[in-house]
C-alpha cells in the first residue's frame, strides 16, 4: 500500500497537512507550487536514461557476439559441419579401399612394373575413351612440335648474343637504307642532267653544221666541257 503524501491536502490530516492548509489559506503556498513539487527530480530522469543506454549497449554487445559466432561457424563449416564431414569420410573411405586393393595386388603389380610393356593393350574403361582421344591428339601435336621446342630451349643461353647480333644487323640495315636513298637521289639528278644534255646536243650539232657551212671556226664552248665533266661525275 502506497504511503500517504504529506503534501496532499486530501490525505489523512496530520501536523504537516494542517500547516500546509494554513499556508494555502494564507496564500503563502499555491496549488501550482505543490504540483511542481510533485515532479520527479532531473537527476533521477538522467539516471533512468543512463540505465536504458546501458541496457541497449549490453544488447548490442550480445548481438555482436552472436554475429561473430555465426561468422566463425560459417568459416569453419567445412571442418565441423556434419554434411562436409560425411563427404570427407566418404572420400577417405574410397581412398582406403583403393589402397587395400593395391596392397592385395602388390605382387602382381610389381611383376607388371618389372616387365616392359610392349605390344600390349591397356584396358581403359568406356567412360574415359573420349578423354583418351583428346589426349592422343595432344600427344601427336606435342611430338610434332617437340623438335621446335627443344631448339628453342637450346637457344635460350644464346639469347643475349642473338639479340646483340640482331641489333647490329638492324643498325647496318638502317645505314644501307640511308645509302640507298642517297643513291636513288643521285640517280634522279643524273637522269635530269642527261635529259638536259640530250635536249642541248641537237641544238649544238645544228649550230656547228651551220658554222661549217659558212667556214667559220668557233672555239669549243665551255658548256660542252661542263656537260662532259658533269656526265663523267654522274657515271
Image: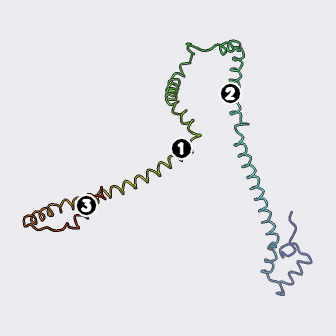
Relative placement, left or right, of 75 versus 9 is left
Nearer the observer, 150 or 15: 150
Q: Which mark is residue 228?
A: 3
Q: Would you place residue 182 above or below residue 214 in this image?
A: above
Between marks 2 and 1, how big is the CA–CA gap? Answer: 54 Å
Between marks 3 and 1, how big is the CA–CA gap? Answer: 50 Å
Residue ID at (84%, 86%) = 28
Q: Would you place residue 158 above or below residue 184 in this image?
A: above
In this rendering, the label closer to the viewer, 3 or 1: 3
Q: Which mark is residue 91?
A: 2
Q: Position of residue 188 (x, y in %)?
A: 29, 58
In this rendering, the label closer to the viewer, 2 or 1: 1
Relative placement, left or right, of 182 versus 143 is left
| Label 2 crowd (10 A; few <14 / some 14-19 / many >=20) | few
Q: Which mark is residue 162?
A: 1
Q: Would you place residue 38 above or below residue 104 in this image?
A: below
Amino acid at each position: 500500500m502506497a504511503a500517504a503524501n504529506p503534501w496532499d491536502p486530501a490525505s489523512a490530516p496530520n501536523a504537516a497537512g494542517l500547516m500546509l492548509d494554513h499556508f494555502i489559506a494564507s496564500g503563502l503556498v499555491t496549488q501550482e507550487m505543490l504540483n511542481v513539487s510533485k515532479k520527479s527530480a532531473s537527476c533521477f530522469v538522467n539516471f533512468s536514461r543512463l540505465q536504458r543506454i546501458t541496457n541497449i549497449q549490453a544488447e548490442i554487445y550480445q548481438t555482436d557476439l552472436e554475429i561473430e559466432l555465426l561468422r566463425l561457424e560459417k568459416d569453419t563449416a567445412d571442418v565441423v559441419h556434419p554434411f562436409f564431414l560425411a563427404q570427407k569420410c566418404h572420400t577417405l573411405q574410397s581412398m582406403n579401399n583403393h589402397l587395400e586393393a593395391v596392397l592385395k595386388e602388390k605382387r602382381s603389380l610389381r611383376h607388371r612394373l618389372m616387365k616392359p610393356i610392349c605390344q600390349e593393350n591397356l584396358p581403359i574403361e568406356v567412360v574415359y575413351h573420349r578423354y583418351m582421344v583428346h589426349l592422343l591428339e595432344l600427344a601427336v601435336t606435342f611430338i610434332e612440335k617437340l623438335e621446335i621446342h627443344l631448339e628453342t630451349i637450346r637457344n635460350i643461353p644464346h639469347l643475349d648474343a642473338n639479340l646483340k647480333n640482331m641489333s647490329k644487323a638492324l643498325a647496318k640495315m638502317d645505314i644501307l637504307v640511308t645509302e640507298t636513298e642517297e643513291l636513288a637521289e643521285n640517280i634522279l639528278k643524273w637522269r635530269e642532267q642527261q635529259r638536259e644534255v640530250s635536249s642541248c646536243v641537237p641544238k649544238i650539232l645544228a649550230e656547228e653544221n651551220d658554222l661549217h657551212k659558212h667556214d667559220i671556226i668557233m672555239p669549243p664552248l665551255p658548256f660542252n666541257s661542263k656537260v662532259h665533266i658533269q656526265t663523267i661525275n654522274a657515271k
